[in-house]
Structure formats: C-alpha cells, structure tokens
Amino acid sequence: MAKEHGYIDSYYQATANVLPEQPELTSDIQADVCIIGAGLTGTNAAIELRKKGLSVVVLEGQRIAFGGSGRNGGQALVGYCLGLREVDEEYGPEWGKQLWDLSVESIDIIRERISEFNIDCDFQEGYIELALNKGQEKELKSWHELKHGRYNYPVAQWWDTDKIEEVANTRRYLGGLFDPNSGHVHTLNYTLGLAQAAISVGAEIYENSPVIKLEKGAGVNTVKTAKGSVKAKQVLLACNAYLDGLHRKAQSKVLPVASYIAVTEQLGDRQPITNKMAMSDLNNCLDYFRPTADGRILFGGVNHPFNGEYPDSQDRLRQRMLKVFPQLADVKMEYHWGGLFAVTRSYMPEIRHLGNDIYTAHGYTGHGVGLTNIAGRVVAEAMAGQAGRFDVFSRIDHGWIPTPKVLRKPALAMAIWKARWKMLWRANLLSCIFLKRVASAALFYWGSTFYPLRLGIVLKREEAMQGDLFEEHGWINIPDGLLYWQPNFIQQDEADKLFALLSDSLPWQQLPITMFGKEVLQPRMQAWFGEAYTYSGLALTPAKMPPALVALKERCEDVAGIAFNSVLANLYRDGQDYMAGTKTMNLS
C-alpha cells in the first residue's frame, strides 16, 4: 500500500479532489481550542467551533484524512454499531430515542455541509442492512417495528428476497431493512471538503505536524509538535484509531481494528446494484459494499485478529464478493487497501470530557462517516457551555481495554472472537440466557490474565480431509491424528460453509442445553481423546442428534458429533495447551 502525495494508494486517492497542502506548524501559537486530528471528527468540530466564534487550530500528523476518514467504506448510516433493539434495551426508551435522533441528525448534517459549502463528494442516498439467516431476519424485523413505533422513523422499509434481487441482482439474503435516509459518500473528498470549509470560516489547519506531547495545565493546555506548540484552554482528541498513546485514559476505551477494501474495475451496464444503494449484512465481522459514482463495486470486510494483513486479502475480498454477485466472476479488482477503525466494548461511540478541558470523540465502531458529524457538533456545544446534548453521549458507560501494546493484540483477538460468538447468538445457535451472560463475562474479562477461550471443533484428520467442506485454511494439527478447527480465528465465510450445511434442518433455538462441570467433562474427554487429555470450560450438547448432525457425524465419525456442539473451552495434552502458538495448515 504505497503512498501517493502523502496518501496511501487507493481508489479514493486516485479520484480525490485537489486541496493544497497545508503548512507544517513551526512556531508557538495560541487558540481557544486545539484539535488533534484533521479527519471527519476534527474538521466537523472546527466548523462548528468557528461558527460559535472560538479560534481553532487543527494539528494533523500526516495529511488531512490520512487515517480512517480517507480510507473507509463511505457508508453514512443512521444508527450505531449496537443494534437498535439492543440500544433500546440497554439505555431505555427515552435515552435510546435521544441517541437515535442524534444519529438521524448526523446524516442531516452531511446534507447541510454539502449544500452550504458546495462539497463534491458523490453523496448517494439509500442503504440496506441484510439478513443471512432466520435469526438476523427476526432481528431486523424487530428494528423495523421499533422504527415505525416509538422511534417515529416511518421511512424504514422491509424488503424481501425478490425486492432485493430486483434492485441488486442477488438472492443471497432472506430480506433486509432499507433506509432511504442513510447513504454513502466519497469519504476522502467529503473530508477534504470539510477541511476546506473549516479553513474558509477561519480555522487554521497544519499538516505533517504530529503531536509529541500533551501538557495539562491550570487554565491552559500545551500541545507540542516537533517544531512548534499550541497553547489552548480546550483540546479535542480527534484521532480515533490513531491515538498512538497520546492520552492513556482515552486510549483505554478504544481498540484499533484493521479492515480491508477492494474495488473492481468499471462495470458499465453489468453494475448489479441498479438503485445505487449501499449494502451490508448483519454479521459482526461483516461484508459491506456499494457502487461508486463511476460504476464500480467497492467491497470491504476481512478483519485480521491481530491487525495484520492476510497476504491474500484482496483475493479473500473478491471471493466474498462473488458469493453475493457470482455473475462478476470475470471482473478484475483494480484497487486494494486497508486501514484502522476504532471499536469500543459498548459498540457505541465514546464522546466525553476527560478532565482539564480535554475532550475526546472516537470509537465509532464502523459508523464514523455519519456519527463524526454529530460528534463535532455536540463537542462544540459543550465547549461553548451548552452540554445538554453532549451528555446524551457522555453518560454511556464504556468498559476498559488494556493500553500496554503487549496486551492490546490479545484484547483485539478476544474482541473479534466475541463479535463472531455474538453472530452465533443472533443466528439463534445459542438461546440460553444464563449461558450468554456467563460467556459475555468471560469473553470480555479484561483483568491481568487473558483466558484463551475458543469455539472449537475436533475431528480425526483422515476424515477431515474428505470432501470440499474441509478443504480450507484454519485447521490445526494436534497429536494423535486429530485436527482442531477455530472458526473464531478464520474467515467468516469458511465458518459459514459449515453452519450453512446445518442451518435448514437444525432448530438450534429449540435444543435443550446442558452445562457440564469439569468432573463430568474430564472422563468424557479422556474417553474421546485418551487419558493424556484434560479439558475445562462449558459445553453445549443437544439431547437428541438431529438429522443434520447425523449426516455430519457420518463424515467425521463419533468425535465430530459431540465436538461440533459449540464447545467453549481449552484443550490440553500432558498439561500443555496445544491451542496456543500452533500454526494453521491447508488441507486442500
């Protein structure tokens, strides 16, 4: 991912509008407010603060929109990463409605900015969230009911498979919730337009001026760069996933996550999304995609559990795209890039006052194109002395995430595991409320010890190699001719392949669940795998074997029948954890 003119090589960079490079800060200056980060949050806040008469300096370590603001999928959405029903249940009807209304306003602000400042950013209305299974369909329909009820959002529409096929030429989804108010933008051009707007109303923006130190003081804070400084009463941290240790308290609430995007060649009359809407599924590790203004498909997803990059990430994205649009099998991918976005444990943005007149707005968890607009507005209101709407966000409780670098990668892996585990809940694979609570507490236990909980399947190696179902990456060799599969550490489409085999005939939500203690599991594990093995954790087992599992059992022998039943545990042999530090293998 080479840099071009200070930006990574991407479709956005190749089609960017021209904005002259801003100067580097080389002197000591003063302002009412110093904003660190010239992305969507920082530029929006700068506009709002200038409109309130405050002097503003924005410091950017690279180029304007160098981070997630200039790399993301461009989907500008009403709502939050946390689903609407969950927002309603977690925060209650009144607070939930306030949060919803602010997210609606965030999209209205985009339209206001484009109109007021004549921003050329290919804004297109229309977005649909899609159901891959019955559980997701039920979830989306509950949102539809809430929106048409007390959330007073009648524009939301339920579309069935035929309606989706009519405008998007795919039958992959059971249905979807269409929102004509949400949409998508050329995110780099939108942010560049915001920066130009901020400059036009009197904000100062300095590029290539990374902040090296933030000194808190009585009545004034000092923000230092390598060649200059800014003294300001108030400071806004608008760095999102690129905070880089600048403020430990702020960093302890967000976790950077890598995501990747690929863009096709121009499709002409082969463009499948004829109504130009943005689309995404309801999985936590989701696929998101949309048409571009010049007739391509931009397709994103593929989260790496340790923020690395798969060497074949572009091909992974292409294969996922072909599951949605198999008719594009001969289409080439012309662009490919990646970047970081910030997630919180609450799946809600963190917008709060940190003390010493220092504010933060970050952790949009995939919804930053929209929510940054309202974040900039409410932070500016709070800095000007009107914190009522700011407090709607600041009251949200966000769990702690470890800040030392040595701990953040394990934390990220656990967060991705939790996201995929949650996807299984949405699909009604787990319906025991008590078990959900136990698993949630375990999965996000952020104490000094990290428990490597895994969802695993153990198969005999010779059986696993039979059939295309198992000819995938992700299997781990363990002793005695067995293989261990970790759906949480491999791509979702590989896990989907296995679960799809069972989904039609396996009524998971009706299965009785048994929780075993170690004294019960230990002899069973030794019976299955030999006396050298030990086992601890929770196991889920159906009381009766349904036909779909019988079919799988015939392919994988006795071990698969019980080990497939969502075992949440560690597997040990001779006291050694064989799941730790092992390498995956390709059986194909």
Image (cartoon, grey):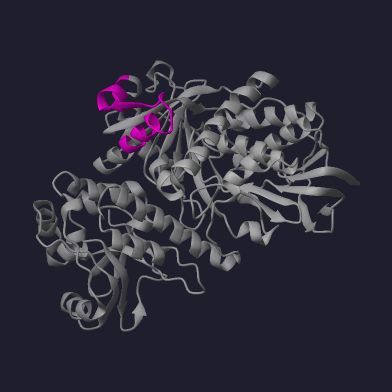
Q: Report the magenta residues as a range.
A: 141-166
Q: Residue furthest front?
A: 94
Any part of residue 538 in sight: yes
Among the 4 quarters of the image, the one containing residue 49:
top right
Among the 4 quarters of the image, the one containing residue 17:
top right
Q: Is residue 367 left or right of residue 155?
A: right
Q: Position of residue 11 (x, y in %)?
A: 56, 31
Question: Which residue: 79% across, 26% down?
Answer: 200
Q: Which residue is nearer to you in this view: 92 or 573?
A: 92
Q: Position of residue 293 (x, y in %)?
A: 52, 21
Assess whether residue 555 is covered by the magenta stretch.
no
Q: Is residue 36 left or right of residue 255?
A: right
Q: Which residue is nearer to you in this view: 453 or 298?
A: 453
Any part of residue 5 in sight: no
Question: Which residue: 70% across, 43% down?
Answer: 382
Q: Is residue 360 above or below residue 206?
A: below
Q: Residue furthest top?
A: 269
Q: Which residue is nearer to you in this view: 220 or 246?
A: 220
Question: Which residue: 28% across, 47% down?
Answer: 427
Q: Position of residue 471 (x, y in %)?
A: 26, 52
Q: Is residue 176 above or below residue 36?
A: above
Q: Position of residue 587 (x, y in %)?
A: 28, 57
Assess whether residue 151 is covered by the magenta stretch.
yes
Q: Which residue is nearer to you in this view: 432 or 259?
A: 432
Q: Is residue 347 left or right of residue 196?
A: left
Q: Is residue 435 left or right of residue 530?
A: right
Total numbered badges shown on the rendered structure: 0
Quadrant in the picture for the N terminus = top right
Question: Which residue: 20% across, 78% down?
Answer: 520
